[in-house]
């Protein structure tokens, strides 16, 4: 099973690096950056800015930034539509769902049978505080939610990514 990970509007370079490291460790197919997510080796940036961001990403990625296939996407909705046409199942990692979105919710730790037959999954992670914006959510076939047992309502995005990617990577074994 192919798993493509979309980082949409992730602000922290350190979160990006940590997610790249997790993605490499779990054999994720590719990482797509979109919105204002900083990208490693972004040719669109001035050299001094690229060097600064690359250093910050590399600090937590520890070499994975050069190992994981990455793509920067400008038009995420068009990219998602193309992936859907190719047969990918699009999944958002989100815990603040509307009543309509609740019908598409899959709790991690429960039966992931709805996803086990997919040849390709696109997992979308959104901005650290606000999550996945509405204009991107409408492309999601399902939403994964990590059940919380403590008083906090969510994990850091890099931790949530690790939990979700671990569960999804087990579908392929």
Image: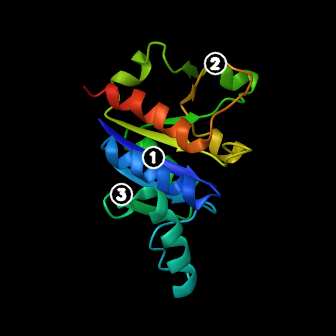
Image height check: is 115 above or below 10?
above
Residue lying farthest to the top in this orientation? 111
Q: Position of residue 169 (x, y in %)?
A: 34, 32
Q: Where is residue 59 in the image (x, y as percent from the top left)?
A: 47, 63
Q: Mark 3: few, some, or many residues within 10 Å (few <14, many ≥20)? A: many
Image height check: is 23 above or below 117?
below
Question: Which of the two discs, 3 and 1, sits closer to the camera?
Answer: 3
Q: Residue at horizontal 43%, vertical 57%?
A: 61
Q: Position of residue 110 (x, y in %)?
A: 48, 13
Q: Tell me which label, 2 or 1, sits earlier in the chain.
A: 1
Query: What scheme was used to colour the molecule?
Result: rainbow
Residue toward you, 140 or 58: 58
Q: Is mark 3 on a helix, strand or loop?
A: helix
Residue toward you, 50 or 71: 50
Q: Is mark 2 on a helix, strand or loop?
A: loop
Q: Mark 3 points at which residue?
A: 64
Q: Residue at horizontal 28%, vertical 28%?
A: 172
Return the mark for residue 5: 1
Q: Mark 2 points at which residue?
A: 103
Q: Quadrant of the N terminus?
A: top left
Q: Residue at horizontal 53%, vertical 31%?
A: 141
| Direction from residue 12 to residue 168 in the image, left or right | left
């Amino acid at each position: 099973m192919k798993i493509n990970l979309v980082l949409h509007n992730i602000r922290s370079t350190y979160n990006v690096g940590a997610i790249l490291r997790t993605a490499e460790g779990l054999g994720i197919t590719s990482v797509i950056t979109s919105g204002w997510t900083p990208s490693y080796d972004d040719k669109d940036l001035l050299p001094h800015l690229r060097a600064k961001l690359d250093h910050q990403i590399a600090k937590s990625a520890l070499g994975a930034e050069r190992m994981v296939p990455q793509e920067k996407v400008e038009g995420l909705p068009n990219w998602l539509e193309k992936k859907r046409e190719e047969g990918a199942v699009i999944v958002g990692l989100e815990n603040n769902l509307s009543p309509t979105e609740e019908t598409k919710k899959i709790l991690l730790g429960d039966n992931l049978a709805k996803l086990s037959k997919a040849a390709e999954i696109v997992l979308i992670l959104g901005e650290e505080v606000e999550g996945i914006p509405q204009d991107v959510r409408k492309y999601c076939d399902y939403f994964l939610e990590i059940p919380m047992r403590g008083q906090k309502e969510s994990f850091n995005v890099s931790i949530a990514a690790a939990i979700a990617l671990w569960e999804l990577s087990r579908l392929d074994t």
